[in-house]
Image: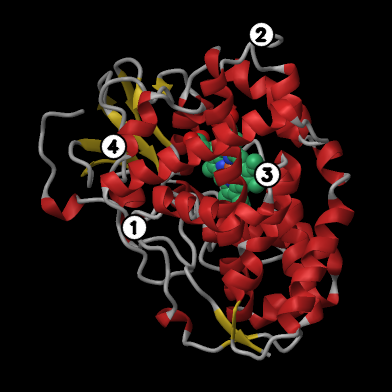
Amino acid sequence: MSQTTPPDSRSFPLRRQCPLAPPPEYDRLRAQEPVSEVRLPTGGTAWLVTRYEDVRTVLSSPAFSADGTRPGFPTLLPGHEQILRRPPFIRMDPPQHSFYRRMLTQEFTLKRVRTMRPGIQTTVDRLLDDLLARTPPVDLVEAFALPAPSLVICQLLGVPYDDHESFQSRSKAVLSGASTAEQSATALGGLRAYMDGLITRKQREPGDDLLSKLVSEQLEPAGELRRDELLMMCVMLLSAGHETTANMISLGAVALLEHPDQLAALRSDRGLLPGAVEELLRHLSIADLVTTRIAAEDTELGGTAIRAGEGVIALLAAANWDPGVFPEPERLDVHRGNRHHVGFGYGVHQCLGQNLARLELEIALSTLFARIPTLRVTVPVDELPYKHGGLLFGLHELPVSW
Ligand code: HEM
């Protein structure tokens, strides 16, 4: 961490003013101070990186490490230092990172994920049947956006969906920014204990699911994984597998409702759907703050010297709104045809679940608007309860009618 103290105006995270756009300060920083120092809420300082090319450099150059155990690794939320003491592979460097990621890549290839399409469609249809049977207003987060990806990741991993309330609320407590360090630690401990119990169950009664497969093939003594390593891997998959996509479904629905011309274009040409999902991922950049790193050596970025051991935050929303790469970035344009946004990160840690997330978003959003053509939000969009201050941006609730 740097010894100099940045001015108070640079305290971080910055707040979104319009919920469907990054904090406006990102534009000024990108134009005037593309690598600038900020004070972190957990103490210490870090470098904020706002230009697209610089963000990609941070996420792909070995000069920047994802190793969360390095002293001074930046944390944004209370209690997250303890996640870094025994981090999952998202906070490791190669070759350690590659060792774990390799065990999972086959499970998330495009080919494998495509076989899940009918199952995801059935899940989405069932949820919408239940939603339509209710009297509006209904909370779209609780009735649809959260259960849809939760059911999918539960089925993939072999986690009983009946346990959803406990793992959803604990994941939220760890990621939301609304918890104290103690609450976050308790929630993480609860998730670990839950997964530990599940591993024991899969050892006794294996099923046709990913957790059972990992237990039988990778866990010691037959495999190379210690129990605590498998546990961390599965906690990460369970949390990352539902909380992220849930935020994208609800926020994506709001963004399309706020841009009726884009929604109409999408309705008239289903072929636009994959591009629309990419554009929503770029535009909303819900994982803006996830990509933290630490300089592994003295280096230089955008003309600024960064010393070994200093924290770096590669802001995904700032990169995705870089006008040099995405002209008129504020325009949500389903025809834009971009696949080079960094909404899923970049480099070796680029989202493992991106094929699954894309498919879930395509099915969830297209089916939602096809089945409920008169869908509307019942509260002014700027008065909705947004997840400011959390690691992932999104909505706590979304009251809708039709
Ligand atoms: C729209 C939804 C999603 C978004 C926006 C998203 C975003 C991201 C981002 C930005 C990263 C990179 C973090 C970094 O470099 O530090 C990441 C990594 C990861 N994501 Fe996702 N994600 C989504 C859905 C999912 C799903 C459905 C899964 C399912 C299992 C998943 C699992 C993971 C894992 C395991 C990693 C770590 C990869 C590694 O370190 O090699 N994500 N995600």
Q: Are marks 3 and 4 in contact (CB under 8 Å)?
A: no
* Lower position in the chain sequence, tag 2 or tag 1: 2
**Mark 4, residue position:** 47
Q: Residues within 10 Å of mark 3 (few under 14, many from 20)?
A: many
Q: Residues within 10 Å of mark 1 (few under 14, many from 20)?
A: some
**Mark 3, residue position:** 159
Q: Residues within 10 Å of mark 4 (few under 14, many from 20)?
A: many
Q: Residues within 10 Å of mark 2 (few under 14, many from 20)?
A: few
Give the residue type that dot 4 points to.
Trp
- Residue 328 vs residue 274, the one in the foreground: 274
What's the residue at 30%, 57% (across, down)? 14
Q: Are marks 4 and 1 in contact (CB under 8 Å)?
A: no
* Lower position in the chain sequence, tag 4 or tag 2: 4
- Residue 402 vs residue 123, the one in the foreground: 123
Q: Are marks 4 and 2 in contact (CB under 8 Å)?
A: no
Write down the quadrant of residue 283 in the picture: bottom right
Q: Nearer the viewer, mark 2 or mark 1?
A: 2
Task: Find numbered disc 3 in the image and state the secondary structure of the residue it sits on.
Answer: loop
Task: Find numbered disc 2 in the image and state the secondary structure of the residue it sits on.
Answer: loop
**Mark 2, residue position:** 221
Indicate which disc residue 389 carries.
Answer: 1
Q: Is residue 205 visible?
A: yes
Q: For the view shown, which residue lies furthest in the front direction?
A: 204
